[in-house]
Amino acid sequence: MPLSTADRSVLEPVVRRLNALRRLSNEARASLEYAMLEGLQRAGSGEDLITEGDRVDGVRVLLSGWLGRYKTLEDGRRQIVNFIFPGESCDAHAYLLSEMDHSIVALTPVVYAEIKRARFEGLLANNPTLSEAFWCETLLNSAIQREWAINLGRRVALERVAHLFCEIVERLRPVGMVDGNSCLMPVTQTDLADATGLSVVHLNRTLQELRAAGLIVLRERTLTIPDLDALKNAALYSPSYLRLYRETEAIR
């Protein structure tokens, strides 16, 4: 049975992002869409989808909202080690691990699809290009994680925050969630501080510096970058680690 326009709309971020990695056949797209529709789930802000130590038996793919991967120290301090944006999976092959080494939390209300392992492996076996797209996503996640390590280990506060904003825009662009150089910024300053290894006070001061320099505008939960090249220069940002995405505009 053909999918309705509403069905396709909620699934579009996944198709667009995977298509930006490898061109999917109509058959692969349809198979993936039906599998996702069968496993639609919702979670509220602050709810953990996965907790460190869990055994994962399938794949979760984010359709809307923001997720955060995080680790917590024994004294309660939290480090967000990456964001997960619409169209991205919570580690496509995590079910191969005996248990998860980190947690994943909904930073906003989210809609996601859960595909059980057997169904997912069947999809990949029958659609080699779909398999390649998910492996490309895994490689891309590794590249992003290396960049985050550099961000925390070598960049100063202003560079860290500027770099994160550049990356957010570039990662949201393939799924059509950037208008010019503006995108939603639905997370809190605490979330941004935990992602950049700063205190909330230091994060707030850094945001003020970026505003004063005319490098960002943050208003009504929307981030606008007036001059993306200028922000990239301030962040020492190079998009080379994201070049697994094809050098085209987002593909439907």
Image: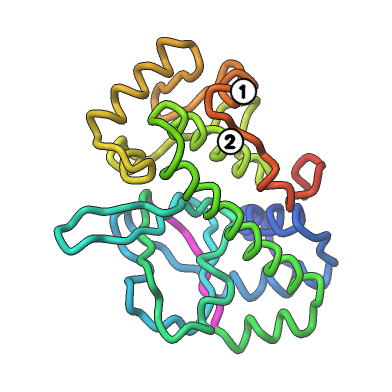
Q: Is disc 1 placed on a helix, strand or loop?
A: helix
Residue positioned 66% across, 84% down in the render: 121
Q: Which numbered disc covers residue 108?
A: none
Q: Which numbered disc covers residue 169?
A: 2
Instruction: Please report the bounds of the magenta region as a residue range.
Output: 109-116
Residue positioned 41% across, 54% down in the render: 81
Amino acid at circle 1: Leu
Q: Residue furthest front?
A: 154
Q: Report if the CB atoms under discs 2 and 1 are less than 8 Å apart.
A: yes
For the residue pair 103 and 63, the one nearer the viewer reads as 103
Q: Residue furthest bottom?
A: 118
Q: Is disc 2 placed on a helix, strand or loop?
A: helix
Q: Which residue is mark 1?
A: 228
In the rendering, at what x and y percent does residue 15 appear?
70, 58
For the residue pair 18 and 26, the one nearer the viewer reads as 18
In the rendering, at what x and y percent does residue 30 appear?
75, 70
Residue positioned 63% across, 53% down in the render: 13
Name the mark nearer the viewer: 2 or 1: 1
In the rendering, at what x and y percent does residue 151 appear?
47, 41
Amino acid at circle 2: Val
Q: Residues within 10 Å of mark 2 (few under 14, many from 20)?
A: many
| 134 displayed left or right of 194 | right
Secondary structure that dominates the magenta span:
strand
For the residue pair 123 and 91, the one nearer the viewer reads as 91
Q: In the rendered image, which quarter is residue 7 located in? A: bottom right
For the residue pair 88 and 142, the one nearer the viewer reads as 142
Q: Is residue 112 magenta?
A: yes
- Residue 175, compared with residue 137, is above or below; it is above
